[in-house]
Amino acid sequence: MAETSECRESPLEERGTMSALHGKTVLVIGAGSLGGPASLTLASAGVGRIVLVDPGTVEPSDLAGHPLFVEADLGEPRGAAAARRLSRLFPGVDVEVPAGGFDEGSAPGFVRASDLVVDASSHLPTMFLANDSAAATGTALAHGGLLNFTVHLLTVEPGVTGCLRCLFEGPPPPAPEAGVLGPVAGLAGSLLGAEAVRLLEGRPGAYAGRLLVHEVRSSRSRSVPVKRRPGCAACGAISGDRAALDGGLP
Amino acid sequence: MVGAGAVAGPALVYLAQAGIGTIYVDDGGDVDDADAGSWLFTPDQVGQPRLLAAIERLRATSSLVRVRPYATDVDPTATLVCAQSESVARKAAERARRAGLPHVVAQASGDGGVVVAIPSGAPCFGCASPPGARLPSRAGAAAAIGTLAAVELLLVVLRLLPGRGTGRRIDLAEGWPSVRPTERTPGCDCHNVY
């Protein structure tokens, strides 16, 4: 059966926003199961520069759900392997893999040099560091998380929406790591990347000020409002719109 | 798998990595610029048959999966329909239904799309999703729909969907998935096949 084309994804050159996105820099924290599909989405949308921070190496567990890695990548630095495949798929995108990780010393510089931060770290202390750095520099943050069969997505617009620390104050105690079904991570990463593209295009964030909690077995979605919390250690000092402070969404 | 384009590509990658034994791919098109979002094809593969280029990439992804061109004499466990063509998708869904195969149909449109899971005995794709206009998909939408379809297919194959013989339709709009059970259209004879 031959397939005919009737409804296709827009070619890059037909997207009116491509030239605008080509001038954008996005910091992607984590090149794992969330960062892979998120980076692919950013690259396919025509984002000009992706800074991919991940100090890890490709492990066998990565091959259970990662669109950028193949078996030949095992043991290689994760950021470099991801960047190599991204550059082959999208030669027009500048993918940069700085040495080292995203830590308290490097975070402010990375975030300041970016138009948007995508937190795909799946690591609680890093999530809060990304949140605090984004709040401190006034940079928008698209955050993604996974727990078993559940996807979490939240966008933080400092001074406008609540942030991760408004919701949780701090990282919870460490818990045993749970496995995640590969395509669930793919779904989360794709939605995360699409949210980043929305923000870069100047459209309203789908998860701005509201946390999406989606459980894939029931396919139920829950929206958790994330209002700015007076006294928040990360964003409490930012002067923002009073309506937003009172819980109104943009 | 019916299709190897922007919706099918991400689904194929995750199914290959999830431990599916054999994947038969059915696609008669060539790689073109619009396939950039499929995650499978590099620019130097433009003009090559999508089927062969997809198989090459999937075999590199995992040595544990067998990936082969679809042939009419094979006997799959389930069908995932990610065809970009509306008419091809509907024909493939109907063929799967008549063969008694559980199937999932995925269609991207604009900023989202729809995924319909049809376990054996559930209302057919025509009942769940009447024909309608679709828009070119925005960045990430096709991948989100493809990965969502891969999740649904695994849930169907593993019999983890809630409710026996119950289908469901997931609509993705502006990044928010919403689900509802499918219902048989009065007069549709799709209950007669199973």
Image (cartoon, rainbow, N blue to C red):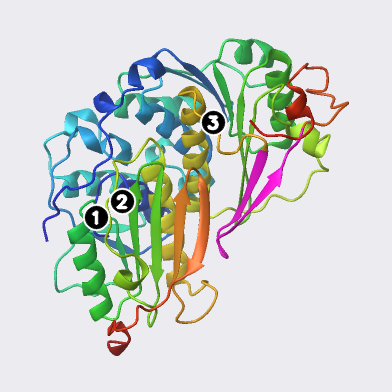
Q: Is residue B159 left or right of residue A223?
A: left
Host chain of mark 1: B
Name the residue tied to disc 3: A204
Kind of residue at badge 2: Ala
- Where B186 falls versus B25 (above or below)? below
Name the residue tied to disc 2: B8
- Where A157 falls versus B26 (above or below)? above
Say which element carries label 2: helix
Residue positioned 41% across, 33% down in the render: A40
Residue positioned 73% across, 15% down in the render: A136
The image position of residue A49, as x and y in percent, is 44, 16
Name the residue tied to disc 1: B83
Could you tell me which quadrant the C terminus of chain B lies in?
Answer: bottom left
Residue A218 within the segment the image draws in magenta: yes
**Residues flagged by tags 2 and 3 on a common chain:** no
The image position of residue B176, as x and y in percent, is 53, 48
Q: Is residue A172 left or right of residue B9?
A: right
The image position of residue A20, as x and y in percent, is 39, 16
Kind of residue at badge 1: Ala
Host chain of mark 3: A
Residue positioned 49% across, 81% down in the render: B164
* Residue closer to the observer: B56 or B164: B164
**Residue span colored magenta:** A210-227
Q: CA distance from mark 2 to mark 3?
A: 28 Å
